[in-house]
Amino acid sequence: MADSGSGKINVLLIGSGGREHALAWALCKSARTGSLFIAPGNPGTARCGTNVALDASNHPAVLAFIEEHEIGLTVVGPEQPLVEGITDFLTANGKLVFGPTQAAAQLEGSKSFAKGIMKKYGVPTGDYLVFEGHEAGAAREHITRNNSWPMVLKADGLAAGKGVFIPQNLDEALWSLDALLADGLYGKPGSRLVIEEFLSGEEVSVFAVCDGKNTRILMHAQDHKRIGDGDTGLNTGGMGAYGPTPLLDEAGLEGVRLTVVEPMLRGMAAEGSPYTGVLYCGLMMTPDGPKVIEFNCRFGDPECQVIMPALQSDFTELLLAACEGRLDSYEPVVDTQSWYTCLVLASGGYPGSYEKGKVISGIPAESEQVQVFHAGTKTDESGRLVTNGGRVLNVVAKGETLADSIRLAYEAAAQISFEGLYKRTDIGAKGLARF
């Protein structure tokens, strides 16, 4: 595909969460971005561009909007539209899209597919077994015979964070299997269950922009998934993140590129599904080195919220270079001298049931050191900003040290209030413990 030149282009961003506000923030700063549209967006993205009511699952409607508004680049934030094949449809109609094809998005959409590719192309990961939907009895028998705990049970497809269990003993494992069967995530024709070896260590997220052949690693970060301090309680979509992480130095990051990212790119190309987009590598830092827990086909949330402020290059130009196969001659600049911390402010009760519509106040003005990205917010009938989700706001701070960035994030967050506000008090503490 030919170079798009150096003029301004109109951009459509699909999504509505904190990740999309961070992406919109970076896109609207770009010298290459003309008009920016976000579908559907949120009150935060409305400050970056124009929010539009557009259903990403209605591909013809998206195409009609792109043609009407002369969109030169479509950026897909969440995974669901990618797994549904929006990239394939728009590309077939001559449109430029940042995001993998439906076949390539199977790296996130199918755990068994991702495991199979890793095994075939020698990418380090845990051992695993796959059980088809009609093999629930065999899965139960395998679990009963298992004598190594904990183990990992995963529904094969996208399950909105509900399809992963890490039972510590036989009773918990059988309960987890029954839960997957009851929820319809396993046991039906066409469904699969992946039972994996449990990997111990600390998790790191590495983000690589890919053009099908070439890759550029942007940054690495550490997410905090559990709701409670000390990584206790239920899993969430992510309660905070910081980056870069001391778990990976420059040599370690190069090792990830050589042993994980590039073999996956070569493997996907060999399988006839070249990978263009961002490849999220969820890694466990084991005693035997980094091993892949999972791949995602989009920027992480809340890791994206620390990556975008650290990116010094023009974001739209970076995405165009990926879409046009030019990453071999394009080197993005990332601020590796500073530290970035993202603190998630959540609704009370999350990740269980919670109330919406709580009035939000005290959001600090954006500065060079602090940004606040909207995740689950809306404007009510009276024009007030109110809560509209489990994860409500992302407070991101830049510091000369990790301790500085953590302190600044918590100081900024302390200015914000809404009824039931909940936040962890130890985001970044795992990183500090490394110094």
Image: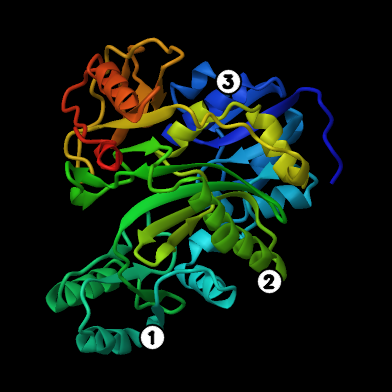
Q: Residue at x 19, y 77 (%)?
A: 174
- Mark 3–mark 2 Cα distance, whole angstroms, equals 38 Å
Q: Residues within 10 Å of mark 1 (few under 14, many from 20)?
A: some
Question: How far across and down, in percent of the image, does residue 171 sit?
Answer: 13, 76
Q: Is residue 77 left or right of residue 414?
A: right
Provide the residue designation for mark 1: 134
- Mark 3–mark 1 Cα distance, whole angstroms, equals 48 Å
Question: How far across and down, in percent of the image, does residue 53 sit?
Answer: 54, 31
Q: Residue at x 21, y 44 (%)?
A: 227
Q: Are marks 3 and 2 in contact (CB under 8 Å)?
A: no
Specify whether residue 65 is in view: no
Q: What is the quadrant of residue 419 in the picture?
A: top left
Q: Residues within 10 Å of mark 2 (few under 14, many from 20)?
A: few
Amino acid on which disc 1 is placed: His
Q: Tag 1 or tag 3, which sits nearer the N-term? A: 3
Question: How far across and down, in percent of the image, does residue 81 sit?
Answer: 55, 49
